[in-house]
Amino acid sequence: MLPLKNLSIASIFSESQKAVDNLTHLALDRRVRLAVTGLSRSGKTAFITSLIHQLLHGLDGANLPFFSVVAENRFLGTKTMLQPNMEIPAFQYDQFVASLTGDKPEFPRATDGLSEIRLAIRFQPSSFISRQFAKTATLYLDIVDYPGEWLLDLPLLNLSFAEWSQQLMEFCKQEPRSALAAEWLEYLNGIDVNRSADEETMRTASQLFTSFLHECRAKNTGLSYLQPGRFIIPGDLKDAPILTFCPLAAGSNSPPKQSLYEVMEQRFESYKELVVKKFYYDHFSKFDRQIVLVDMQKALNHGAGSFSDMQGALQGILNSFSYGSSNLLARLFQPKIDKLLFVATKADHVAANQHPNLERLLNRMVVRPVNEAVFQGVEVKTLAISSVVCTQTVVRDHHGRRLSFVKGVPIGRSDEVMLFPGEIPESIPSLSDWEESRFNFLDFQPQTHASGGSIPHLRMDQAIEFLLGDKLL
Amino acid sequence: MLPLKNLSIASIFSESQKAVDNLTHLALDRRVRLAVTGLSRSGKTAFITSLIHQLLHGLDGANLPFFSVVAENRFLGTKTMLQPNMEIPAFQYDQFVASLTGDKPEFPRATDGLSEIRLAIRFQPSSFISRQFAKTATLYLDIVDYPGEWLLDLPLLNLSFAEWSQQLMEFCKQEPRSALAAEWLEYLNGIDVNRSADEETMRTASQLFTSFLHECRAKNTGLSYLQPGRFIIPGDLKDAPILTFCPLAAGSNSPPKQSLYEVMEQRFESYKELVVKKFYYDHFSKFDRQIVLVDMQKALNHGAGSFSDMQGALQGILNSFSYGSSNLLARLFQPKIDKLLFVATKADHVAANQHPNLERLLNRMVVRPVNEAVFQGVEVKTLAISSVVCTQTVVRDHHGRRLSFVKGVPIGRSDEVMLFPGEIPESIPSLSDWEESRFNFLDFQPQTHASGGSIPHLRMDQAIEFLLGDKLL
């Protein structure tokens, strides 16, 4: 509101015209840029495919009771649009949905790098005022898929090369990193970091470090907190100097000009400047909402080290969203993101009675700071969902106890099994829990379902409502 | 020179100081950015590897009589330097030379995309004046390796979408393109280009067109003039809208808004803007000298269509260097390139007495315009060389005639053979030459050579002298 003394007929008119414009805009044309990323092979491609599928089939049989625009019969349909950005690869929805809904359904192969797709959702505005301007409105939804590692690069902006090196060397003192890092660290031990830099030594050191990162990420290790992200998915930067460095323990003196230490430090700084900041300027700063997918069962399966690593990664991500005045990112620019959703995927891989614990455990891992005010305007939520339901929960008597079993076809097998996958702890497991190695959750294959019907899911509608509900009023 | 009236003691001093600075700079520190590209699997990686190897071994046994700095005993040695550009991948010389000079020598695998390496060549200046400032000087040589297709994108800048489409459709009326394009063109026939654009149709059309380009480039077809270059090596742009178009025959009327034709036309224009111009601004405009490698024998083997296609490609490249006032590129910026070398590689795959014809034939293919003045300041040369000699020429009597045979191990075989590979025509073959299918040249494997010795070559020293000689005076 303008101060009274500045009011004139012209300014009053201009102000009310602005209000009308805003409303018209509100009613006619809205845009949301929704970013989806995931940690540790969390089923990102399946999630996005199911999300698009549910929106496309919102009128004909999708089961979306919590998606209010559908529940209130204001949903008019969704269609895919032309790709919005010339240089961003298309998310290959057609291919992915074909592999999920074919005669022999399979999870689509994991995507690499960045991709996006644009949808247009037509709906009837709910409010009286909006409806004065238009009977129908459109929400343009851009879904952007990018690797979780790129989000985990964000904390690098707050670290010097020495600080980052020290942090990573500390991580490497503990298993499972300790064993995996042995070869790389042994090579570093044989090097004087103050000697004159040469490409061959730097290449060998960075190749060993990159192999270490790949092993950390491998299926049988399943670590999440991996930096720098571009080392794992290099794209066109493969073998470039900007990816040819690694953490180094500082030498005793300040490093001489053109020494290994100094040159690697320069490359680390260039990485921050040309890779990390570029991603944040070109992409991250334009996102409206962010989803982070997590495979909790996999983290539990892999044991204490992997689990606490995932917790560290989630915490690192959350810190990037706390816009305190000391946050480097906040000083660089103000991200637009106002909703942040953490999702535990593959909820159907445990019995239905375990879902509340899955959500509680994820909630405990995403420990928010005591002072919630640091998340100025960012709404944070956790949900346990299933993008594509692969199993049924069956309750049976077992040696006199009522137990909830899961029935489905585990990946890599051909026959259906009924098994008791165990219980999800509702809080962070204690050391003794791990020693008993009580977690052994399996992955299941998608099932064929009635043609024409939509992909069965769990709570996708709650996720959609949280992310889009307020934009469809 | 300043006009006389402006002269003062201070300005005279400043001018002569400038002259001294220029001379010092001349004597102490020079830079050359040498771009290497090739058509149709011409042995680019082997050429660059041998080039670096000869320079590194210029002091110990490399056979470089025509490289004047070596012949005049002014050469002091070469070493590899740190990579000059953070975001350009390193040319992996160590790996490539290891595969060429190992116990079982093999040609290094072809590289994809862009890479570079920096060498420092130490030498004694030859001129009296230079030597007053320094006894030794250094030439910093950046060798940049990039795909020939990127150079062939240059002519696109002078074409509209309609012109380019028409040109390509004309090409596709002739074999071998005609048969390879059949599936793609049949799909286009079923499409109304004036209908509303959708991603699925555009993706299918551009995938069929991309497959067509790959088949044109395949070993058994061996075409060279392939556009747009990024369709073949997409890198991070794979599946992006900017690579999701293809040539289209225009509809009867002017295309409606958002029609297939209009959207593909926009994408073609974006390709020119964001891919082609970007390459020229970021890279091409910074090159000092350019080498284009050609495998003449392969073009001859593949017959009339492939041969005239290569001639078209060479002509297209040459036109990019004719800086007439009508040239779009000349208006955009003035490239620095002052020497352009066309090289027929694998000269050793034919007998020594055929080398002059190889050079003459290449010379005939690179037909310069009558008025050489359009190449303002660009010196153009052709040479027949061998980066890595794989054979020996042996003269034998054969049914009473003295014939020159080639002795070596053809690729894919294990035993040495002696064969008469036939003659290279000294002018463009006539139609009857092709009908007799008289060209059947083979590729040979590199041989083990005495350890410590340098890689055997033919006329690499002449190539090096042309490209660098004047910078080492």
Image (cartoon, coloured by chain):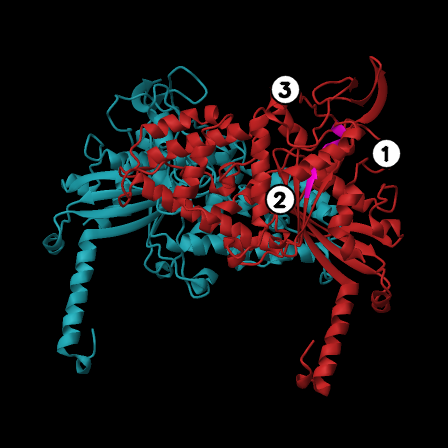
Chain colours: A red, B cyan
Above or below residue B334? Residue A60 is above
Other-residue count near label 1 (Cα within 10 Å), few / some / many at <14 / 14–19 / ≥20: few
Circle 1 residue: A451
State whether residue B175 appears in this view: no
The magenta stretch spans residue B204: no
Amino acid type, callout 1? Ser
Marks 2 and 3, how far apart in space?
44 Å
- Left or right of residue A108, residue A57 in this image: right
Position of the C terminus of chain A by quadrant: bottom right
Please tell me in which quadrant of the rendered image residue A298 appears. top right
Amino acid type, callout 2? Asp
Marks 2 and 1, how far apart in space?
29 Å
- Left or right of residue A184, residue A140 in this image: right
Q: Which residues are magenta?
A: A342-349
- Left or right of residue B430, residue A335 in this image: right
The foreground one among B33 and A332 is: A332
Other-residue count near label 3 (Cα within 10 Å), few / some / many at <14 / 14–19 / ≥20: few
**Which residue is at the far front?**
A370
In what element is the residue under mark 2? Answer: loop
Above or below residue B251? Residue A128 is below
**Which residue is at the far top?**
A399
Are the numbered discs 2 and 3 placed on the same chain, yes or no?
no
Q: Which mark is residue B239?
A: 2
Other-residue count near label 2 (Cα within 10 Å), few / some / many at <14 / 14–19 / ≥20: many
